[in-house]
Image (cartoon, rainbow, N blue to C red):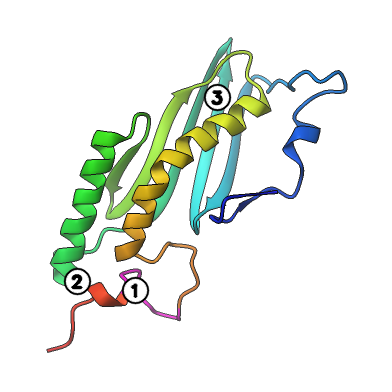
Amino acid sequence: MTFGSGGWALPIDPGSVLRDGSGKALPLADGTTQFDFRYRDIRFVGRVEVDHGSVTLRIVGDVGPMPYSAESAQARAGLARICAVANDSLKHSRLRVVQGRILVGTDLALETPPTATGLVSAVVEFLLPTRPYLELIAVYLRPPLAPAKNGETALQPEWRKRPR
C-alpha cells in the first residue's frame, strides 16, 4: 500500500494486521517504540513512549540544509519565510533550523489505550498539513534522499550563485 505519491509505502495491508481476530484494534505495549519512514524523499524518525496510560508521539524529519547567505541569500531568505509562515499556520507541527538543517517535527499526545491504528492516523495527520510547505521548500532544495550526482549540492541549480 502506498500513501500518496510521496513514497511512503507499507509492504502490508494495515487493515489486516492492526486488528485482532475479533476486529478490535491491537494495543501498543508499555515502553518506547522507535520507527522511521520515508515521505517525499525525506527521512522521518518517530518515537512512541507509553508510560502508565500516557502516550507521547514525537516525529522529526530532516528536510535538508539551510543554505548560507554566501551560497544564495535569496534561497536562504525564501526558506526562512516558508518556515515562518508554516509555523504561523500549522497547528501541531514546527519547522526549525537546527545546526544548519531544516527540521520539521511534532510532539503529540495519543489517545489511550494506544493502538497501531491511532499511531498511523496521528502520523498521517502530522504529514498532510506539512505537504504544501515541503513542496515549497523543494523549490529551493533537493530533498535529502532524492537521487543526486556525486558531489552535487542540495540547493536547486537555479538558486546557486553563478561563477563570476
User: Which corner quadrant of the image does residue 160 belong to?
Assistant: bottom left
Residue annotated with mark 3: 49
**In the displayed structure, does residue 5 sit left or right of residue 64?**
right
**Label 3 with label 1: CB-CB less than 8 Å:** no
Residue drawn at point x = 88 percent, y = 23 percent: 21
> Which callout, 3 or 2, points at the residue further toward the start of the chain?
3
In terms of secondary structure, where does tag 3 sit?
A: strand
Give the residues in magenta.
149-156
Q: Are marks 3 and 2 in contact (CB under 8 Å)?
A: no
User: Relative to residue 85, is residue 68 depicted above or below?
Assistant: below
Alpha carbons under labels 3 and 1: distance apart: 36 Å
- Quarter holding the C terminus is bottom left
Q: Residue furthest right?
A: 21
CA–CA distance between discs 3 and 2?
40 Å
Secondary structure at badge 1 equals loop
Mark before the other along the chain sequence, 1 or 2: 2
Name which quarter of the figure residue 119 lies in. top right
Residue behind mark 2:
71
Sooner in the amino-acid sequence: mark 3 or mark 1: 3
Query: Callout 2 environment at 10 Å: few (<14), some (14 to 19), or many (20+)?
Result: some
Q: Nearer the viewer, residue 77 or 99?
A: 77
Q: Nearer the viewer, mark 3 or mark 1?
A: 1
Residue identifier under label 1: 153
Does the image show residue 146? yes
- Magenta stretch, overall SS: loop
Amino acid type indicated by mark 3 = Glu
